[in-house]
Amino acid sequence: MRFTLSLLVVVWGVVSAPASAQSWTPEQQKIWSFEEACWQRDTAKDLTWIDSCVHPDATSWGIDHPVPRNRASVARWDKYEYGNATVLESELFPLSITIVADVAVVHFRYRIASENSRKERETVTGRYSDVLIKDGTRWLIITTVGGDDPKR
């Protein structure tokens, strides 16, 4: 599901925050609220999250995909995956938000409980690193890397 979300960026003069949102700047809080809203819409099977959360030129490379994908590919595979499973519960765990000028890097972990079409339930954990760019007054995802942790 998720824009099989991230990228490693080397930056200077960074503003960074640990998982405690209480110490985040207002801009970091805005970015985290954006991330949560996009995630919520995706797990609710709302494909419009892509148009409102993802930059038109974005690419992503999930650990379960052989090559980076563009927005059209993300929409195609999300639509397919939406028919195969339903998210019963999910939770995000923010790790850091770094902002440099009009670029933000967000690292977070997640936990998802889902049910497939055969009514089998599964709980997975994973991680994403999203790179966002500021487009006017709003943030948009330009790339994402991550996915589920390996099964043990």
Image: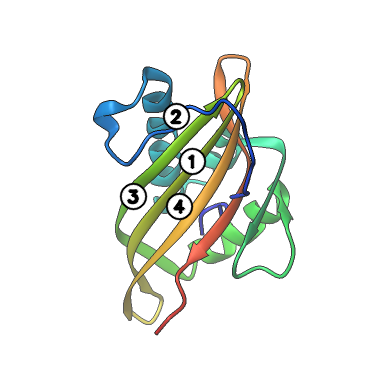
Residue 4 visible: no
| Nearest the eye: 95 or 4 | 95
The quarter of the picture where residue 151 lies is bottom left
Q: Secondary structure at mark 1?
A: strand
Label 3 neighbour load within 10 Å: few <14, some 14-19, many 20+? some
First of labels 1, 2 by sequence position: 2
Which label sits on residue 31? 2
Residue at horizontal 38%, vertical 82%? 118
| Nearest the eye: 18 or 145 | 18
Amino acid under label 4?
Lys
Residue at horizontal 59%, vertical 31%? 140
Label 2 neighbour load within 10 Å: few <14, some 14-19, many 20+? many
Q: Secondary structure at mark 4?
A: loop
Between circles 1 and 2, the one closer to the viewer is 1
Percent position of residue 133, x then y: 62, 29
Q: CA distance from mark 3 to mark 1?
A: 12 Å
Which label sits on residue 45? 4
Query: Which residue is the site of mark 1?
Result: 106
Residue at horizontal 37%, vertical 56%? 110
The quarter of the picture where residue 16 lies is top left
Q: Are the residues at dot 2 and dot 3 in contact (C-beta closer than 8 Å)?
A: no
Amino acid under label 1?
Val
Residue at horizontal 63%, vertical 52%? 75
Q: CA distance from mark 1 to mark 4?
A: 23 Å
Q: Are the residues at dot 1 and dot 2 in contact (C-beta closer than 8 Å)?
A: yes
In the image, 72: left or right of 24?
A: right
In the image, 117: left or right of 72?
A: left
Query: Which residue is the site of mark 3?
Result: 92
Amino acid under label 2?
Ile
Q: CA distance from mark 1 to mark 2?
A: 8 Å
